[in-house]
């Protein structure tokens, strides 16, 4: 298995371990500060991944698709990380602290959420593109970074799909289950 792919998998697992431990500390053990510290460690996982990629390339390694995937992971983590942690926090609060049940959105409210996701995706695409550019310029050897160029079309397709998704739910809003019958 490619070294960078292994690091990506380890970082993804690490991200969710910190989220899980943070939420367990917060809601099950009632250690709010400990929970906050553990949740605050999730960006450290991103720094570990970015550092590993830079070290690998600076040591003479050739960039592969997985280096581009690492950049994509970092973009998604920065743009969507807070939303993912909030999603998990709502469910933990409901399950372990008698918080309100997570609310499913419908209609124009759901469409607004999809447009917020388009903005998040735009941020993720921009961050990913920036990291790819940074890596290519740090290495400064096109023969070793050629594989990174293949990520740009993926970013465009991803953004386009998210945009179409938002447009479709704006034109045809998601109906509440009781309204479907």
Image: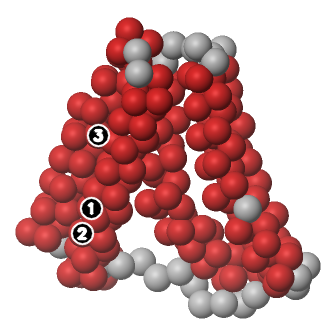
Indicate the quadrant containing the N terminus: top left, top right, bottom left or bottom right: top right
Q: Nearer the viewer, residue 60 or 175?
A: 60
Q: Nearer the viewer, residue 178 or 57?
A: 57
Q: Residue at x 40, y 30 (%)?
A: 137
- Gap in Å between the C-alphas at discs 1 and 2? 5 Å
Q: Nearer the viewer, residue 118 or 58?
A: 58
Tag on residue 84? none
Q: Is residue 170 left or right of residue 14?
A: left
Q: Nearer the viewer, residue 109 or 2?
A: 2
Q: Residue at x 53, y 61 (%)?
A: 81
Asked whether the beta carbons under mark 2 and mark 3 sit within 8 Å of each other, the answer is no
Identify the secondary structure beneath mark 2.
Answer: helix
Earlier in the chain: of badge 2 and badge 3, it is: 2
Tag on residue 115? 2
- Gap in Å between the C-alphas at discs 1 and 3? 12 Å
Mark 2, Cα crowd under 10 Å, few <14 / some 14-19 / many 20+, is: some
Tag on residue 118? 1
Percent of width and height locating residue 126: 32, 51
- Gap in Å between the C-alphas at discs 2 and 3? 17 Å
Earlier in the chain: of badge 1 and badge 3, it is: 1
**Does residue 154 sit above or below 86 in this rendering?**
above
Asked whether the beta carbons under mark 1 and mark 2 sit within 8 Å of each other, the answer is yes
Q: Residue at x 18, y 56 (%)?
A: 163
Q: Is residue 49 left or right of residue 136?
A: right
Which residue in the protein does label 3 denote? 155
| Res 106 quadrant in image | bottom left
Q: Is residue 172 visible?
A: no
Percent of width and height locating residue 10: 71, 37
| Res 56 quadrant in image | top right
Tag in front: 2 or 3: 3
Mark 3, Cα crowd under 10 Å, few <14 / some 14-19 / many 20+, is: some
**Does residue 72 sit above or below 112 in this rendering?**
above
């Amino acid at each position: 298995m490619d070294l960078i792919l292994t690091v990506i998998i380890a970082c993804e697992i690490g991200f969710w371990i910190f989220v899980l431990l943070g939420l367990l500390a917060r809601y099950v053990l009632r250690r709010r500060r400990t929970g906050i510290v553990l949740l605050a460690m999730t960006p450290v996982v991103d720094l570990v991944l970015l550092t590993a990629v830079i070290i690998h390339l600076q040591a003479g390694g050739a960039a592969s698709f997985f280096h581009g995937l690492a950049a994509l992971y970092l973009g998604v983590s920065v743009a969507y990380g807070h939303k993912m942690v909030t999603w998990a926090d709502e469910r933990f609060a409901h399950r372990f602290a008698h918080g309100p049940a997570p609310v499913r959105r419908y209609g124009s409210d759901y469409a607004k959420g999809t447009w917020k996701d388009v903005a998040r995706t735009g941020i993720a695409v921009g961050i990913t593109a920036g990291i790819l550019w940074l890596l290519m310029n740090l290495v400064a050897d096109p023969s070793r970074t050629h594989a990174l160029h293949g990520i740009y079309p993926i970013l465009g397709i991803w953004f386009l799909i998210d945009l179409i998704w938002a447009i479709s739910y704006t034109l045809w809003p998601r109906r509440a289950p009781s309204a479907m019958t």
